[in-house]
Image (cartoon, grey):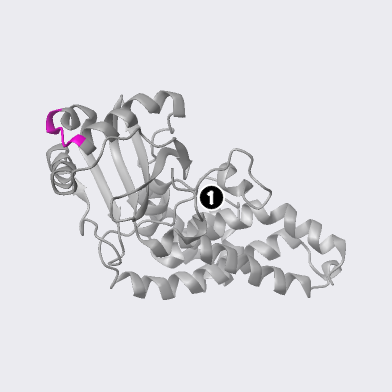
Amino acid sequence: MPPDRHIATFEGERRRLAGLAYRMTGSVAETEDILQQAWLRFAGQDLAALESPARWLTTVVSRLSLDHLKSARRQRETYVGAWLPEPLLESPEPTPEQQWMVTEDVSIALILLLETLSPEMRAAFLLRDAFDYEFEEIAPVVGRTPATCRQLVSRARKRLAGAEPPEAASLDAARPIITAFWEASREGDMQRLLEIFAEDIAVHTDGGGKVPAAINVLSGARRAAGLFVGLARKRQLPQRPCPPLRRINGAPGFISVDPAGVVQTTAVSLRNGRIAALWIVRNPDKLRHLGDVAG
């Protein structure tokens, strides 16, 4: 069994390492697997021989995440419909293992932006801007020269510049608008939905080809409202109160179950009192880690 110092060092870095792995992969399951692999490697190391155990761990997690991402990108090419990261539900009293979910920037908007970067660019950007790695340190991780790493980070910053999402609203502030959306979407009230939605709203629904979901991201208030009006007419949903609000990747949202028994998470981005984005995950493979938590 590894000495206590190994355990204390690894646990002290768990939050940062998990935040890095999740931002690289967008997967809770892969994050847990990567951390387990990193721990097994770390447990066999002589700490006295490591100049910086924390940096050693960050490098290992980065390389494991990069390997996964290169493989996952090939799978994404055949992914059915819109892709969203596995949702992270904030617990009122998070365990140490869950603490990274509430202390790291793991917003859905950020993960989707990072998805537009190449695996190497994504890793270089996170290591430089989130972990303050020097380009000489990034180079062996991504397999590029320091000069190329500098270019990768520069390009990543340009792509992400000005695209930071607005600060997530408090649950109390979000409750009236989300409740109004819940009611209007179930009633199929087109006019009310148009009043609730921002003109440039984007609706992402991830079913992964496993359950019914919109194939493409729906942009614009009228198209988005049309989706929910159509669903309401088709399903004839019974009246029921809006589920309790939860933090999902830092954003207000809720968990619900449709008449067919499909569990889904709905995360909401608000801007100027209207809904600017909806991120709906229905793919059961991405909800396994939630357990029986439907509201």
- Give the percent coordinates (x, y) of residue 170: 46, 28
Quadrant of the snapshot with the N terminus: bottom right
Up the image or down, 295 lies above or below 115; here it is: above
Residue at (41, 65) in percent of width and height: 285
Instruction: Say what secondary structure mark 1 lies in.
Output: helix
- Give the percent coordinates (x, y) of residue 155: 38, 55
Residue at (75, 62) in percent of width and height: 53
Up the image or down, 103 lies above or below 261; here it is: above
Residue occupying the far front of the picture: 238
The magenta region covers 187-191
- Give the percent coordinates (x, y) of residue 161: 37, 44
Residue situated in front as seen by the camera: 203 or 283 = 283
Q: Is residue 239 left or right of residue 288?
A: left
- Give the percent coordinates (x, y) of residue 141: 57, 70
**Residue 267: quarter of image:** top left
In the rendered image, residue 188 lying in the magenta stretch gets the answer yes
In the rendered image, residue 251 lying in the magenta stretch gets the answer no
Q: Is residue 241 left or right of residue 170?
A: left
Residue situated in front as seen by the camera: 146 or 184 = 184
Up the image or down, 155 lies above or below 172; here it is: below
Q: Which residue is mark 1?
A: 129
**Residue 195: quarter of image:** top left
The amino acid at mark 1 is: Asp
Residue at (87, 66) in percent of width and height: 3
Q: Is residue 144 visible?
A: no
Secondary structure mainly formed by the magenta segment: helix
